[in-house]
Amino acid sequence: MVVIGGLGTMVGPLGGALLVYVASEFLRDFGNYQLVVFSFLVIIFARFFRQGLWGILFKGVWLRDDAGRSTRP
């Protein structure tokens, strides 16, 4: 949950927990395949998206203006 949501903030792990809970409810009918899906997600996020979903949203949406330029100083 923390790896998928993002480390370093309180919102990231809470969002990750919500996502994992909702996804596990949708994947309940598939049995043990839900563990495979979550394992795959953790591997992908740990390898490519080290800041988790919160980091992706924060960097990708809120730090860009309308022209797509970064608003960081």
Image: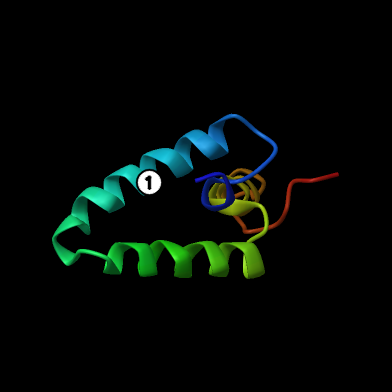
**Is 27 left or right of 50, judged from the image as shown?**
left
Q: Residue pushed farthest top?
A: 10
Q: Quadrant of the C terminus?
A: top right
Q: Residue at x 37, y 67 (%)?
A: 37
Q: Amino acid at mark 1?
A: Leu
Q: Position of residue 19 (x, y in %)?
A: 37, 46
Coloration mode: rainbow
The local crowd at label 1, few if under 14, some if 14 to 19, many if 20 or more residues have their Cα within 10 Å, is some
Q: Is residue 31 left or right of residue 19?
A: left
Q: Residue at x 56, y 44 (%)?
A: 2
Residue 13 x, y percent position in the rendering: 54, 38
| Image vertical order of residue 20 relative to residue 29, above or below | above
Q: Residue furthest left?
A: 29
Q: Residue furthest front?
A: 32
Residue toward you, 23 or 68:
23
Q: Residue at x 30, y 63 (%)?
A: 34
State whether residue 28 appears in this view. yes
Q: List x then y, in percent, for residue 24.
A: 28, 51
Task: Please identify the quarter of the rendering in which residue 22 is found.
Answer: top left
